[in-house]
Amino acid sequence: MDGFIARLIINTVALLVLPYIVPGVHIRDPLAALAAAIVLGLANAIIRPVLVLLSLPIQIITLGLFTLVINALMLLLAARIVAGFEIYGFWPAFWGAIVLSIVSGVLSWATAPLRGHH
């Protein structure tokens, strides 16, 4: 459970950083970021694997780059569900998915010693 909470906090912080880096992304407040992190986590756990499987031929042709489109769609879905989290179009979602992956990866790496991971 501690790993889940740590990942939730990391994703919430990464979502809060997103509007400062990607034009076209707006998060009203930290509570909206937390709600978006929860919805995004659920979407990534439930819907994303199905989309990846269904898009396998495209994944093979694009050498996996189509995953970026799927990640953008997950962000757009979260923005549709969560009040206070808005993404104005596909391209902000696309770049937002890339930035979100980078920021959450850096935060995970930076906090690994605090979480007992080496």
Image (spheres, rainbow, N blue to C red):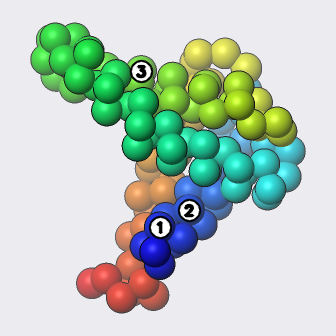
Closer to the observer: label 2 or label 3?
A: 2
Q: Identify the residue at horizontal 40%, vertical 43% (top origin).
A: 45
Q: Is residue 81 above or below residue 33?
A: above
Q: Which amino acid is tagged 2?
A: Leu
Q: Which mark is residue 4?
A: 1
Q: Quadrant of the C terminus?
A: bottom left
Instruction: Specify whether 1 is left or right of 78.
Output: left
Instruction: Specify whether 51 is left or right of 87.
Output: left
Q: Identify the residue at horizontal 41%, vertical 24% (top origin).
A: 70
Picture coordinates of residue 51 (x, y %)?
34, 22
**In front here: 22 or 27?**
27
Question: Are there few (<14), some (14-19), or many (20+) residues within 10 Å of tag 2?
Answer: some
The residue that label 2 is drawn on is 8
Residues under numbered marks 2 and 1 in contact, where contact means CB atoms less than 8 Å apart: yes
> Whole-Å distance between the Cαs marked 2 and 1?
6 Å
Q: Is residue 107 above or below residue 42?
A: below
The residue that label 3 is drawn on is 69
Q: Which amino acid is tagged 3?
A: Val
Instruction: Specify whether 83 is left or right of 53.
Output: right
Q: Is residue 106 above or below residue 117?
A: above
Q: Secondary structure at mark 1?
A: helix
Quadrant of the rendered image containing residue 14: bottom right
Q: Identify the residue at horizontal 82%, vertical 36% (top origin).
A: 83
Residue 21 appears in the rendering: yes
Q: Identify the residue at horizontal 31%, vertical 82% (top origin).
A: 117
Residue 65 appears in the rendering: no
Picture coordinates of residue 65 (x, y %)?
28, 24
Q: Which amino acid is tagged 1?
A: Phe
> Whole-Å distance between the Cαs marked 3 and 1?
25 Å
Q: Which mark is residue 39?
A: none
Picture coordinates of residue 32 (x, y %)?
78, 48
